[in-house]
């Protein structure tokens, strides 16, 4: 046909999409990387450390972010969403909606002055709502591209018609309230979906008390609480009274392997609860931790050794059993009620802080995107890959990688990203 | 260049408030101006922004700078950018020096800004003294042979070969057995679809018929030489030697099932392995009514600590196949933790439970005991021992590293982990790369992997390999080690320590030689050489000493 476009659109700038983009770009294939947020980085940017090496997450991710931004073959579309596609493998036409940033991308140097002066405080999604950001902001300190964004829904000028302080203080005149959302048309040979996952809301399981008990938090909230760049500067304190917790409990499979919620296994929780317990222990060697689990799923490379180290060197007590409920005493201490396997008796243990390993769930807009792309979802709403060719979607020329197709950890997301890139390259490089 | 007057420009970054919010940057800038050879110093809010970069470029020209220092964040993330900027302004990129006053200063001294400011001055002064001695270096260019070598003709190797061939590259696929197919040839059906394993082996024909793939069967590797872009491998087939040239190598050699001999009174009759059961199921000759499967035989123990990843799903599959054939059969799986992560596999496990397969957890300290016609096992839930009668016991054996993986690892000069599986460059972010450029790993050679994992990984390895094969030339690091032959006594300490196997012995002169293409300039050899016979360019003894001396160290 001669219309085959040597370019690939990657939807989603988390670690899977970043890996796919970098691999393709290094092969000389043009990449259009579409990111819904203002910065790429995805979930990995929110993590404190990563198992089983306990590497600092952002430290190993940041060079890849910079590489994506600098690579001449990667064009980054942030604040952007796919609106429509047509065509077929080798020649897709795509419509992208690029939302207004209200900041001129070429002018802003992220000096921080506007952020400092902005009077509006908004819950910070990156920090799991644990602190406030301003209405003009950057997702996170190391975010790429390193430029600020105006949050239209909360900006005083957009909501009340007054303020414009950022505009006045910006020496580079980078603020542009007149900016409009724009539609961009792209022509690509193949498409890679790398949209990642959302977190299960544990409020659905009322017996666990999340949302009612201040000292019951989710694992991703815990990552932020313990992270040096998080709201507590890495000094772990429990939410109710800002006291140092000495007794932690992690509950695995919250919302996972649970037919009332998500029947599937979230793949990573056995490992990351062990990691979080290890990091907490490194901060405070007097800490006692219990992890409640159903099966310990640690089949990856070095994972068994990691669990063993957790037990031997980090004083982690692994308790097999499903937690029935969490109560709270008068001092806001969560009390876990569970059935002791050895005695078959119901037991209670009091903790200072309880962390829920909540399921990875499909993105809430997964069905919308699947309709636009014309690809199938599975029974849980993850993008449906082949049983033996997991990166293949139900449509030729569209490939899947990372947790958008099934819950998976970082190494598997990287493998998937490279794997999807290989399949997309086959399409765009064929003659 | 040698006689040219040294003119240093220092650019000090506020990094927003990261540095500027803590350290007194204007004060530091004034200080920098007083240092020897410094003809220009300025501060920027963000040196890495386009504004900052333009300022660097313009001042290189305006002040004829021949050394540039940026005092900011980490070279790990930003050195390539600043080097490129210097290059754009006509300066050799190795005349750039980075001083980290953020990660190593403002971030760690947030509560003592005055001392942090003094430390920044020290660090910058050290950078200036080092920069004055920097030498221009050239990146080394390597040509790429645009073909691949894939070692191992199982599902991983075949899939990698096909992907590369579809990308347009020539592929050499070598297999030590007389047939392609690997372990799948021994399987009856494959999970999670329970279709015939032969269906997946149809890929064999695609590989054999592909014009871009040359298949070498019954082939043994004799020798591997070379480096990224230029590997030379010698193989033997029926005493015939063939030399294969390739730009990259993919290791897809798989793993082997552990022999059940000596475990749980294995006898090959009514106590057999899962692999033997595959064979019986294939021939439709399973007649047992009471089947017990034992998981984690020979693994997750002192000798072999790891979980073999794929045995739970294998057991579930065979248990369900037996149940389907004979719904009255009693099938029990005695397990430690059921490994069925993700969506499809967990659903498969649920299906097995619905089909009436009994799951009994055992503790490693109280393993099942096999009696004449029944098995006794302690169960934690019931808190007592239970007996189950059997007429067939099936042992789930782990996959273990191949006998010859050590030999291959030595030839490739890549590492193995403690269990003998190949060790990748970075567990998190480089799962199919080796630290040595141009060599990749996929499938069970890396870690026990099932078919879908093998296919994902082999796609990934092919993608990584394509990043090399799609280029005509590759530029590699110019900052490398150099041996002073007059000082080298040939002790080989550096050869043993080099993580990239870049150093070899020159038998003629009894000294060592550095392959500059492979060398990454990490400096391990230089630091360990007892005779100071090794210079690490860009980190020479003189450069480092002058930095230390100006800090206050003694020469």
Image (cartoon, rainbow, N blue to C red):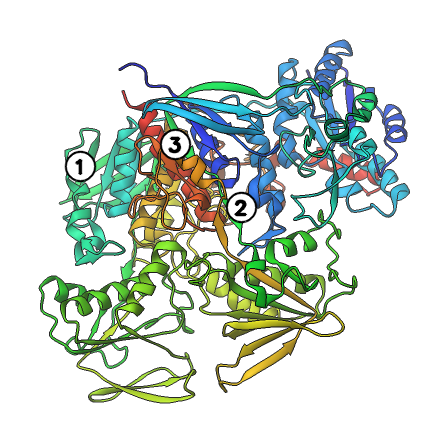
Nearer-the-camera pick, A58 or A131: A131
**Whole-number angstrom distance, CA of label 1 to CA of label 2:** 46 Å
Q: Is residue B227 visible?
A: no
Nearer-the-camera pick, B430 or B484: B430
Give neighbour class at mark 3: few <14, some 14-19, many 20+ (Cα, 10 Å). Answer: some
Return the mark for residue B206.
1
Label 3 sits on a secondary structure element that is helix
Q: Is residue B123 left or right of residue B341?
A: right
Q: Is residue B244 left or right of residue B382?
A: left
Give neighbour class at mark 2: few <14, some 14-19, many 20+ (Cα, 10 Å). Answer: many
Query: In x, y percent, where is residue B107?
Result: 77, 44
**Whole-number angstrom distance, CA of label 3 to CA of label 2:** 55 Å
**Residues beneath discs 1 and 3 located on the same chain:** no
Q: Residue at x 53, y 46 (%)?
A: B494
Return the mark for residue B451.
none
Task: Please state, as top left, top right, bottom left or bottom right, where the C terminus of chain A lies in the image.
Answer: top left
Q: Is residue A153 above or below residue B200?
A: above
Do the residues under discs 1 and 2 have CB atoms within 8 angstroms? no
Residue indicated by mark 3: A373
Q: Is residue A39 left or right of residue B370?
A: right
**Front position among marks 1 and 3:** 3
Q: Is residue A211 left or right of residue A340?
A: right
Task: Please state, as top left, top right, bottom left or bottom right, where the N terminus of chain A lies in the image.
Answer: top left
Q: Is residue B78 visible?
A: yes
Residue indicated by mark 2: B494
Query: In x, y percent, where is residue B504?
Result: 45, 41
């Amino acid at each position: 046909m001669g219309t085959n476009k040597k370019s690939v659109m990657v939807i989603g700038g988390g670690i899977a999409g970043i890996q796919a983009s970098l691999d393709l770009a290094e092969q000389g294939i043009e990449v259009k990387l579409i990111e819904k947020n203002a910065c790429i980085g995805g979930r990995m940017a929110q993590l404190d450390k990563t198992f089983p090496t306990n590497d600092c997450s952002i430290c190993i991710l940041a060079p890849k972010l910079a590489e994506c931004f600098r690579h001449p073959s990667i064009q980054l579309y942030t604040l952007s969403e796919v609106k429509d596609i047509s065509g077929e493998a080798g020649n897709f036409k795509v419509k992208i909606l690029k939302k207004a940033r209200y900041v001129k991308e070429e002018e802003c140097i992220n000096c921080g002055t506007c952020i400092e002066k902005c009077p509006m405080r908004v819950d910070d999604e990156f920090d799991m709502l644990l602190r406030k950001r301003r209405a003009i902001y950057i997702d996170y300190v190391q975010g790429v591209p390193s430029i600020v964004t105006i949050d239209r829904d909360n900006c005083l000028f957009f909501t009340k018609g007054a303020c414009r302080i950022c505009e006045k203080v910006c020496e580079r005149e980078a603020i542009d309230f007149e900016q409009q959302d724009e539609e961009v048309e792209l022509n690509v040979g193949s498409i890679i979906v790398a949209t990642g996952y959302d977190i299960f809301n544990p409020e659905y399981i009322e017996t666990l008390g999340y949302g009612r008990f201040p000292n019951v938090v989710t694992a991703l909230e815990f990552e932020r609480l313990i992270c040096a760049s998080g709201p507590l500067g890495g000094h772990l304190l429990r939410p109710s009274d800002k006291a140092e917790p000495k007794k932690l409990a992690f509950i695995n499979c919250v919302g996972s392997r649970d037919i009332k919620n998500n029947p599937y296994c979230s793949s990573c929780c056995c490992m990351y609860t062990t990691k979080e317990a290890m990091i907490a222990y490194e901060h405070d060697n007097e800490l006692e931790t219990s992890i409640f689990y159903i099966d310990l799923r640690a089949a990856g490379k070095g994972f068994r050794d990691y669990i063993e180290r957790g037990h031997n060197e980090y004083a982690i007590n692994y308790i097999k059993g499903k937690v029935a409920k969490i109560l709270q005493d008068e001092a806001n201490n969560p009390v876990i009620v569970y059935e002791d396997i050895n005695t078959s008796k119901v037991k209670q243990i009091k903790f200072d802080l309880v962390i829920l390993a909540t399921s990875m769930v499909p993105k809430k807009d997964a069905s919308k995107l699947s309709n636009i792309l014309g690809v199938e979802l599975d029974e849980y709403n993850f993008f449906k890959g082949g049983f033996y060719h997991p990166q293949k979607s139900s449509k030729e020329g569209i490939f899947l990688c990372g947790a958008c197709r099934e819950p998976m950890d970082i190494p598997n997301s990287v493998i998937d990203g490279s794997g999807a890139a290989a399949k997309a390259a086959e399409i765009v490089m064929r003659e | 260049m040698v006689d040219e007057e040294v003119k240093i420009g220092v650019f000090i970054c506020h990094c927003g408030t990261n540095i500027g919010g803590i350290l007194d940057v204007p004060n530091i800038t004034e200080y920098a101006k007083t240092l020897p050879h410094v003809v220009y110093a300025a501060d920027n809010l963000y040196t890495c922004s386009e504004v900052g970069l333009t300022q660097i470029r313009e001042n290189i020209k305006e002040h004829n700078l021949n050394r540039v220092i940026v005092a900011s964040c980490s070279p790990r993330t930003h050195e390539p950018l600043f080097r490129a900027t210097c290059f754009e302004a006509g300066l050799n990129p190795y005349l750039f020096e980075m001083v980290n006053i953020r990660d190593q200063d403002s971030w760690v001294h947030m509560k003592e800004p005055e001392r942090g400011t003094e430390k920044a001055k020290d660090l910058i002064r050290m950078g200036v003294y080092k920069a004055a001695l920097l030498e221009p270096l050239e990146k080394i260019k390597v040509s790429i042979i645009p073909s691949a070598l894939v070692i191992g003709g199982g599902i991983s190797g075949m899939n990698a070969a096909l992907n590369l061939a579809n990308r347009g590259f020539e592929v050499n696929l070598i297999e030590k057995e007389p047939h392609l197919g690997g372990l799948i040839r021994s399987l009856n059906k494959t999970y999670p679809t329970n279709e015939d394993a032969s269906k997946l082996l149809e890929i064999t024909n695609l590989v054999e018929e592909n014009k871009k793939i040359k298949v070498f069967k019954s082939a043994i590797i004799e020798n591997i030489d070379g480096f990224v872009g230029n590997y030379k491998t010698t193989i033997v087939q029926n005493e015939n030697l063939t030399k294969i040239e390739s730009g990259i190598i993919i290791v897809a050699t798989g793993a082997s099932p552990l022999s059940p001999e000596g475990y749980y009174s294995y006898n090959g009759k009514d106590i057999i392995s899962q692999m033997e059961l595959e064979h019986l199921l294939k021939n439709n000759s399973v007649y047992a009514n009471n089947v017990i499967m034992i998981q984690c035989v020979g693994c997750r123990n002192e000798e072999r600590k790891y979980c073999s990843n794929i045995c739970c799903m294998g057991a579930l599959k065979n248990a369900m196949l037996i149940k389907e054939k004979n719904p009255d059969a009693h099938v029990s799986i005695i397990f430690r933790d059921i490994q069925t992560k993700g969506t499809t596999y967990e659903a498969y496990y649920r299906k097995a439970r619905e089909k009436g397969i009994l799951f009994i957890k055992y503790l490693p300290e109280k393993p099942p005991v096999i009696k004449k016609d029944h098995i006794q096992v302690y169960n934690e839930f019931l808190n007592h021992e239970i007996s189950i009668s059997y007429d067939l016991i099936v042992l789930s054996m782990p996959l273990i590293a191949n006998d010859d993986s050590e030999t291959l690892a030595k030839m490739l000069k890549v590492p193995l982990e403690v269990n003998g599986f190949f060790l990748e460059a970075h567990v998190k972010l480089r799962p199919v790369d080796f630290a040595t450029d141009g060599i990749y790993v996929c499938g069970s050679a890396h870690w026990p992997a099932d078919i879908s994992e093998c296919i994902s990984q082999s796609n990934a390895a092919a993608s990584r390999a394509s990043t090399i094969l799609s280029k005509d030339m590759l530029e590699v690091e110019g900052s490398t080690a150099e041996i002073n032959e007059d000082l080298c006594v040939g002790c080989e300490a550096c050869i043993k320590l080099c993580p990239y196997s870049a150093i070899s012995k020159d038998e003629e002169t009894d000294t060592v030689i550095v392959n500059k293409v492979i060398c990454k300039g990490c400096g391990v050899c230089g630091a360990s050489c007892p005779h100071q016979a090794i210079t690490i360019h860009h980190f020479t003894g003189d450069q480092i000493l002058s930095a230390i001396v100006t800090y206050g160290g003694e020469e």
